[in-house]
């Protein structure tokens, strides 16, 4: 009986650690300057949050260039609470630039913003795919 109680206590204590972050899942990016967009799978990477490009689409919805599939788009992001994420970086394939970034989660919408020095770029609002 003591063993069962200890196991139950361990599960209850570890549950918050095992809970998935609300940002985890696949997100459709805002179309770039050419109208192309992608699907980014956001997941846990070590102690932080990262996102890899898993699909690429042309402006007409057909399969896009596959060169960037599997590459990190988001890395070193941390959950700051209340749907805010920061401290990480986002790579914009269309401009081949990496931005210090922050994100704001609101339901199935993810507002993305990034800056290089004093130049900031609105990454638009991404939509949850799943």
Image: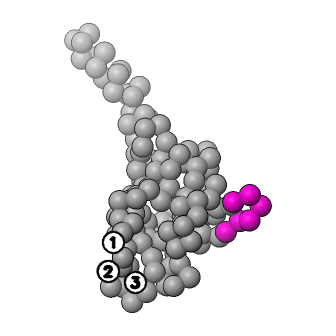
Decide whether residue 122 is among the magenta residues. Answer: no
Q: Is residue 77 left or right of residue 114?
A: left
Q: Name the colouring of the figure.
A: one colour
Q: Residues within 10 Å of mark 3 (few under 14, many from 20)?
A: some
- On the image, the x and y values in percent for residue 127 come to 47, 70
Secondary element at image label 2: loop
Q: Residue furthest bottom?
A: 60
Q: Which residue is mark 1?
A: 66
Nearest to viewer (mark 1 / mark 3): 1
User: Which of the two labelled residues, at mark 1 and mark 3, occupies the earlier sequence position?
Assistant: 3
Q: CA separation, marks 1 and 3? A: 11 Å
Instruction: Please tell me whether residue 85 is drawn above or below residue 120 in the rendered image.
Output: above
User: Which of the two labelled residues, at mark 3 and mark 2, occupies the earlier sequence position?
Assistant: 3
- On the image, the x and y values in percent for residue 104 come to 60, 59
Does residue 22 appear in the picture of this structure?
A: no
Quadrant occupied by the C terminus: bottom left
Q: Which residue is mark 3?
A: 58
- On the image, the x and y values in percent for residue 53 come to 39, 63
Nearest to viewer (mark 1 / mark 2): 1
Decide whether residue 120 is among the magenta residues. Answer: yes
């Amino acid at each position: 009986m003591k063993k069962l109680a200890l196991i139950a206590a361990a599960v209850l204590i570890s549950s918050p650690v095992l809970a998935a972050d609300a940002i985890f899942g696949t997100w459709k990016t805002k179309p770039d300057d050419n109208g192309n967009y992608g699907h980014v799978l956001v997941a846990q990477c070590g102690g932080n949050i990262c996102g890899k490009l898993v699909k690429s689409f042309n402006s007409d919805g057909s399969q896009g260039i596959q060169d960037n599939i599997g590459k990190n788009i988001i890395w070193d992001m941390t959950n700051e609470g209340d749907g805010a994420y920061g401290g990480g970086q986002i790579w914009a394939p269309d401009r081949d630039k990496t931005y210090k970034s922050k994100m704001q989660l609101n339901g199935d919408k993810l507002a993305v913003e990034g800056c290089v020095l004093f130049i900031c770029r609105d990454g638009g609002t991404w939509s949850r795919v799943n």
